[in-house]
Image (cartoon, rainbow, N blue to C red):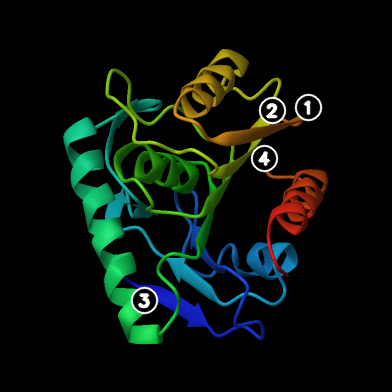
Amino acid sequence: MKHIFKKGTREDAPTLVLFHGTGGTESDLLGLGQYIAPGSSILSLRGNVLENGMPRFFRRLAEGVFDEEDLVFRTKEVYEFLDRAAEEYGFDRGNLVAVGYSNGANMIGDLLFHYKGALKGAILHHPMVPRRGIPLPDLSGTPVFIGAGTNDPICSLPETEELQSLLKGAGADVTVHWEKYGHQLTQTEADAAAAWFREHYTV
C-alpha cells in the first residue's frame, strides 16, 4: 500500500495509523495526526481502490451502500499490511491507534469488527456501521472516539448511535462527540479528539 511513515519522538507513545476519506491521499491527515499526538510515530495509508479516480479503502455499490465482499478483502489487506509495516519500521504492532475520516473511519471500524487486538484504540471521524449481522470480537477495554454530526447527511444520528451500541456491546469504551456541522471535520472536533487521546495515552 502507498503510505508515509514518520518516526516520532516518544518510543512509548502509540503509533498513529491514518486513514483518509474518499478522494484523499496519505498526506491528508498528517497535520491532524501530529496535532492529536505530537510525540507519536505516524503511518499514513492510501486506499487501494479508485472510484472515478478518487482513492478509497474499499468499493461501494452506491453512496452509503458498501460492497461487503470487497470490504472484507480490503480489511484483511490492511490488517496484513500493518503486520508487515511493524516489522519494516520497527514499531510495536500491539500499540497502534487508528485515526480516520469518513471512508477511512469505516475501514477502521471494520478492522475492529473483524480482528481482536487489531488496534489499541481508534478515533473515528464521521463513521458508519461497516457491517451488520456479524459477531464482533471481544473489544473489552478498547477506547474508541467517535466524532459525529447531528445533521450529517451521510452518517445519520441513528447510524452513529447504532455503531456506538454495537461497539459497546462488544466491550469497547466508546466516547461520542457531537457537532452541528454535517459531515465535515471541524477544529472543535479535532480538539475533542486530541483531548480524548491525552486522557487515554502517552503523548
Please indicate, yes or no, whether residue 191 appears anywhere in the rendered image: yes
Q: Amino acid at mark 1?
A: Lys
Residues at discs 2 and 1 in contact (Cβ within 8 Å)? yes
User: Extreme top residue here?
Assistant: 158
Q: Is residue 71 placed above or below 62 in the rendered structure? A: below
Q: Identify the residue position indicated by label 3 in the image.
A: 86
Q: Which residue is pictured at 69% across the width and 28% down the height?
A: 149
Q: Quadrant of the C terminus?
A: bottom right
Whole-Å distance between the Cαs marked 4 and 2? 8 Å
| 13 relative position to 177: left or right | left
Whole-Å distance between the Cαs marked 4 and 3? 31 Å
Please indicate, yes or no, whether residue 48 appears anywhere in the rendered image: no
Q: Which residue is pictured at 57% across the width and 13% down the height?
A: 158
Q: How far across and down, in percent of the image, does residue 13 sit?
A: 63, 72
Q: Amino acid at mark 2?
A: Gly
Q: Identify the residue position indicated by label 2 in the image.
A: 149
Q: How far across and down, in percent of the image, does residue 68 sit?
A: 23, 32
Whole-Å distance between the Cαs marked 2 and 3? 34 Å
Q: Identify the residue position indicated by label 1 in the image.
A: 180
Q: How far across and down, in percent of the image, does residue 125 sit?
A: 60, 42
Q: Is residue 9 placed above or below 183 in the rendered structure? A: below
Q: Which residue is pictured at 38% across the width and 51% down the height?
A: 117
| Foreground residue among 179 and 117 | 117
Q: Residues within 10 Å of mark 1 (few under 14, many from 20)?
A: few
Residues at discs 4 and 1 in contact (Cβ within 8 Å)? no
Which sits earlier in the primary sequence, circle 4 or circle 3? 3
Q: How far across and down, in percent of the image, does residue 31 sit?
A: 68, 68
Q: Which tag is nearer the camera, tag 2 or tag 3?
A: 3
| Foreground residue among 180 and 177 | 177
Residues at discs 2 and 3 in contact (Cβ within 8 Å)? no
Per the image, label 3 sits on a secondary structure element best described as helix
Which sits earlier in the primary sequence, circle 1 or circle 3? 3
